[in-house]
Image (cartoon, grey):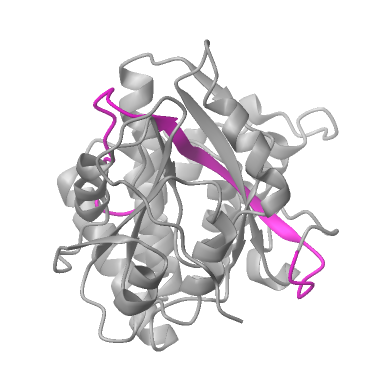
């Protein structure tokens, strides 16, 4: 079926207009699904290509997209910010080629452009996949998948929709976000009930080994750039666990805590690493503290009596 593509005036800057900004590389298999899902909602599409060798550019152009080129430099924030600089809409929507919006949610997105209170919105992504893909407490084991492939999803929330012209930029070479800029500058922010839909198995890396090496490289680079940022240590620990570097991952987890970053998953990750390293005592302690953090009203274990010093000692 041929999809008619509207013509856009790329230089217009109209009240309520929306610029879709994306980056891509070899996403020909999923790109039509993504761009079709925003037709009729966005006023312009700006895509920064980081080196596609497949048919991605031709597909994007068939939807009226403005294509910019920036060779890949191990930095996700860089091409995203290049796209933001060329956006001319009143608002910016951030998506990836393997994601979609549902047509029924277009009206809700448009309403956000009329806001007098918020200049940015958190949007939750529904990451669909089998339960074994994300074995953690966040998994929602029911419904939602418009493709009907999976029975559940893992939600993740970040800023994806914001007003243009405020200097908002992405920060972080990996797991890049605009949230840091928004928080630091105390910009008014709200939450949108409209989800973005994403399928976790659709990755661009050719093999698990390639993916593991890529994540490890990006994690190490982010820590080198932001050595005092606890979340960067947590992200590196995740990459190290994927690569089978359990001792190194344990050290990175400990450093994340020392730098003030603390999420429930850290305890369970450390427990898993220490158990695989045959350190049962520390593995059990980390697991207990994870239970305390997750179910603090349902457990008899008092986290105060299980000090972090004992958990982090030697890591």
Q: Position of residue 30 (x, y in %)?
A: 50, 75
From the viewer's side, name the closer residue of 26 and 165. 165
Q: Residue at x 78, y 62 (%)?
A: 152
From the viewer's side, name the closer residue of 200 and 101. 101
Q: Position of residue 137 (x, y in %)?
A: 72, 50
From the viewer's side, name the closer residue of 156 and 196. 196
Q: Which residues are magenta?
A: 146-174
Q: Main secondary structure of the magenta part?
A: loop
Q: Residue at x 25, y 85 (%)?
A: 53
Q: Is residue 117 above or below residue 68?
A: above
Instruction: State yes or no: residue 21 in magenta.
Output: no
Report whether residue 186 is seen.
yes
Report whether residue 137 is seen.
no
Q: Quadrant of residue 136?
A: bottom right
Q: Position of residue 92 (x, y in %)?
A: 40, 38
In the image, taking residue 138 as reference, residue 113 lies left or right, namely left
Instruction: State yes or no: residue 158 in magenta.
Output: yes
Q: Quadrant of residue 63?
A: bottom left
State the quadrant of the N terminus.
Answer: bottom right
Q: Residue at x 38, y 21 (%)?
A: 183
From the viewer's side, name the closer residue of 170 and 266. 170
Q: Is residue 300 above or below residue 114?
A: below
Q: Is residue 191 above or below residue 129?
A: above
Q: Residue at x 53, y 76 (%)?
A: 202
Q: Is residue 315 above or below residue 70?
A: above
Total labels: the figure holds 0
In the image, taking residue 186 as reference, residue 69 lies left or right, namely left
In the image, taking residue 72 as reference, residue 207 lies left or right, namely right
């Amino acid at each position: 079926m041929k999809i008619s593509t509207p013509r856009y005036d790329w230089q217009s800057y109209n009240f309520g207009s929306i610029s879709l900004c994306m980056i891509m590389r070899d996403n020909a298999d999923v790109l039509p699904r993504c761009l079709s899902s925003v037709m009729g909602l966005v006023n312009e599409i700006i895509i920064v290509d980081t080196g596609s060798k497949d048919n991605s550019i031709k597909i994007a152009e068939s939807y009226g997209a403005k294509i910019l080129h920036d060779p890949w430099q191990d930095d996700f924030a860089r091409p995203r910010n290049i796209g933001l600089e060329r956006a001319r809409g009143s608002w910016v929507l951030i998506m990836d080629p393997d994601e979609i919006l549902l047509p029924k949610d277009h009206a809700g997105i448009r309403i956000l452009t009329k806001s007098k209170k918020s200049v940015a919105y958190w949007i939750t992504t529904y990451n669909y996949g089998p339960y074994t893909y994300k074995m953690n407490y966040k998994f929602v084991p029911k419904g939602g998948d418009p493709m009907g492939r999976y029975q559940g999803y893992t939600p993740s929330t970040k800023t994806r929709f914001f007003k243009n012209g405020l200097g908002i930029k992405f920060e972080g070479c990996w797991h890049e976000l605009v949230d840091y800029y928004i928080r630091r500058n105390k910009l008014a922010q709200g939450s949108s009930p409209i989800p973005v839909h994403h399928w976790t198995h659709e990755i661009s890396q050719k093999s698990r080994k390639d993916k593991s090496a890529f994540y490890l490289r990006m994690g190490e680079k982010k820590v080198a750039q932001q050595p005092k940022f606890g979340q960067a240590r947590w992200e590196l620990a995740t990459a190290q666990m994927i690569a089978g570097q359990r001792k190194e991952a344990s050290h990175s987890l400990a450093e994340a805590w020392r730098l003030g970053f603390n999420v429930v998953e850290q305890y369970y990750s450390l427990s898993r690493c220490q158990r695989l390293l045959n350190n049962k005592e520390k593995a059990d302690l980390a697991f207990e503290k994870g239970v305390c953090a997750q179910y603090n009203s349902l457990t008899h274990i008092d986290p105060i009596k299980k000090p972090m010093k004992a958990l982090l000692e030697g890591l």
